[in-house]
Every structure is written in C-alpha cells, then in structure tokens.
Image (spheres, rainbow, N blue to C red):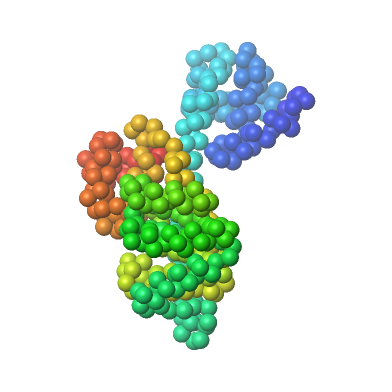
C-alpha cells in the first residue's frame, strides 16, 4: 500500500512492530490511520488513497469494529474512529502475559538443560574427567564453600533458595562476604521473595548491599548455587536433600549453562527494597509463581519448598487467590487466572 506525505518512512515503522507483536494485518492499521486522518472519507476514498480495493477496505473496517477501534460501519455513513487505547492495551497485556509465560518456560528449560549437561558430565567424570569433584560430607561441603569464596578474585554469583537463612549460617558467612567485598570482588546474590518476612535475613542482605553487594529477590529459584570467577561452581548433589553432599564443577560447558541460567534469572529479579506495589486485587509475583508451579503439576509441598515458605502459607495463599477470583475449586481458579491474564 502507498502512503502520501514526507513522514512516510517514520509512520511505516510503528505498524510493522505493532502488527508483528499483536498478529494484526498492516493493512488494518493503515485503514485506521486513514480514518483518523480523514474522518469524512467513505470506503471509496479510503480505498483510492491506499491503492486498495473497496472489498479489502470493508473487511478491514469490519475487523476494526470488532476490535472496538471503530463504530460499526453500518451505523454511520462514514467510519468513526474510537480511541484505540483500551483495545490495544488489552491485546498488548495479553501478549505480555504470553511472553512472560514463555520466559518462565525458557528458564525452566534452561534448568533442565543444565541438569542434562551435568548428568552427562557426571557420567564422563566416572571415566576420569577432572571437571567434577564430589563432596560427600557436609563438613567437606562447608570447608570447600569457604575456600572457594576466600579465593574469589573477580566475581561471586549465588542462588540462595530456601527462604529465611539461619542466624548461624548468616554469621558464618559474614567474615567471608566482608573480605570478598573489601577486596573488590563483585557479589550478586538472588534470594527468594519470602526472605522479606524474616528480619535477620533482610538485615543481612541490606548489610551486604551497604558494602557494595548486589541483592535481588525472585519468587522461586531452581537450585542452590555458587559460581566463583566464572571458573568453578558449587552445586548440591540432591536439591531436595542438603545432607547428600555437593559437587564442584569446573567443566566449561556446564559452567556456561549455569552462568547463562544465573544471568537469565537475575534479569527477572527485583531489588530487595525496590519491588513496586501491586494494584489492588492484582496478584503478587509470588502468587503468580505459585499458580505457575501448580499449573505445571507441583504439589503444595514442592511449591512451598520452591517459594521458601511453609505448607500452611501456600494453602493460605491459594485460598486468598481463589477468593479474589471467585473460584470454587483450584481448577476453576486456574481457568479464571488464565482468562484474567495472570498466567
């Protein structure tokens, strides 16, 4: 289609992007722009201006009316444009929800990929690969954790799932963290959103931030992890059993997957004191994560562990969500949450 005027190039960029995101036809937006620019034109004038057929223009007018961007064409001799803000906002919000869901699925896929890489590397480790080191004793894990943190020169990346940290663990970490930050080591740590309910953990996180550490929170984390200088990582042998030991990873392929997982998750995190207030009746990030976990088949117990909260809290959250949606069952809550664009 042709367009007249000196600003042709600038105007053509926006419809292309909007059409690509929302799945709209470029012709549809061109017709709408013409109706806005020439409100006294009929179908014939619009078709001539755009170099299109009247049949194509009528089809576009009908579709624009269905999208609530025009009054129904039969009710007026000329198409009457409506403010597109409401209808386009609904479409953009729906698309944004779809993108968020895809991002969550991508993050889970990255986790599964990292697990597969680790499983393969572990099998190779049985054949003498020095990229992996097994630590069976809890005391050995703690000693190696302290050693790795002490030797860090450039960067420490950490996932800290499990919710509130014990005071003993926090006090044990304080000297190492203080030494690392004083030496100029960049520290980025991701906690669960639920740590905001624990005074000791939030005070410790703020203390770290005051010393230069970067802290963010997120509704759930895939695994406990420490990556040192992007050259070595410490992971639990069994994420569900902290007493099962840990594995030290130096294999470049596994490290690349773990670092990519961290960076992707870090982008989704929120500053400890910078989470925006939720609109009334809108779900929190933690509630959305709970709905996603349950949608993927997680039990209440698994969801509680991933969110770092108690089983009782998970059931209370779910009851509040159902009440807000007016749902009589969890299945109905899932359907209504999807319709509302929450998940």
Residue at 41% over, 35% down: 277
Q: For the C terminus, which image quadrant?
A: top left
Residue 308 placement, left or right of 185: left
- The mark tally for this picture is 0
Residue at 40% over, 71% down: 142
Residue 15 point in image, percent of width and height: 63, 34
Q: Is residue 117 above or below residue 299?
A: below
Q: Is residue 141 above or below residue 323?
A: below
Residue 250 placement, left or right of 321: right
Residue 242 visible in the displayed image: yes
Residue at 53% over, 13% down: 76
Residue at 53% over, 51% down: 212
Q: Is residue 260 above or below residue 277?
A: below
Q: Quadrant of residue 56?
A: top right
171 or 44: nearer the viewer: 171
Residue 203 placement, left or right of 82: left
Q: For the N terminus, which image quadrant?
A: top right
Residue 177 point in image, percent of width and height: 48, 60
20 or 77: nearer the viewer: 20
220 or 77: nearer the viewer: 220
Q: Quadrant of residue 169?
A: bottom left
Residue 126 placement, left or right of 49: left
Residue 186 point in image, percent of width and height: 56, 57
Residue 298 point in image, percent of width and height: 31, 57
Looking at this view, name the residue that lies furthest to the bottom.
127
Q: Quadrant of residue 244?
A: bottom left
Residue 117 visible in the displayed image: no
């Amino acid at each position: 289609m042709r367009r007249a005027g000196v600003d042709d190039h600038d105007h053509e960029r926006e419809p292309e992007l909007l059409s690509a995101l929302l799945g709209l036809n470029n012709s549809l937006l061109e017709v709408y722009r013409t109706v806005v620019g020439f409100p006294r034109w009929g179908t014939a004038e619009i078709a001539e201006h755009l170099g299109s057929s009247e049949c194509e223009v009528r089809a576009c007018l009908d579709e624009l009316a269905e999208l609530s961007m025009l009054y129904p064409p039969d009710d007026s001799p000329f198409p009457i444009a409506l403010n597109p803000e409401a209808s386009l906002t609904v479409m953009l919000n729906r698309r944004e929800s779809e993108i968020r869901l895809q991002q969550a699925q991508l993050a889970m896929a990255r986790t599964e990929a990292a697990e597969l890489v680790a499983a393969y590397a572990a099998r190779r480790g049985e054949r003498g690969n020095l990229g992996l080191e097994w630590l069976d004793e809890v005391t050995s894990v703690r000693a190696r954790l302290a050693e790795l943190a002490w030797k860090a020169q450039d960067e420490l990346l950490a996932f800290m799932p499990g919710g509130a940290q014990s005071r003993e663990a926090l006090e044990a970490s304080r000297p190492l963290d203080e030494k690392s930050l004083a030496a100029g080591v960049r520290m980025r740590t991701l906690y669960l959103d639920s740590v905001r309910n624990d005074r000791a953990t939030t005070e410790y996180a703020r203390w770290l931030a005051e010393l230069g550490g970067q802290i963010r929170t997120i509704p759930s984390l895939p695994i406990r992890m420490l990556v040192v200088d992007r050259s070595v990582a410490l992971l639990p042998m069994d994420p569900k059993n902290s007493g099962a030991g840990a594995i030290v990873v130096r294999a470049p392929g596994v490290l690349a997957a773990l670092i990519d997982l961290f960076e992707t998750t870090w982008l989704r995190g929120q500053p400890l004191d910078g989470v925006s207030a939720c609109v009334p009746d809108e779900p929190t990030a933690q509630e959305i994560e709970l709905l996603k976990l349950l949608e993927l088949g997680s039990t209440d117990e698994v969801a509680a562990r991933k969110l770092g909260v108690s089983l009782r809290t998970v059931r209370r959250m779910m009851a509040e969500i159902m009440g807000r949606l007016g749902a009589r069952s969890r299945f109905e809550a899932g359907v209504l949450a999807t319709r509302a664009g929450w998940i």
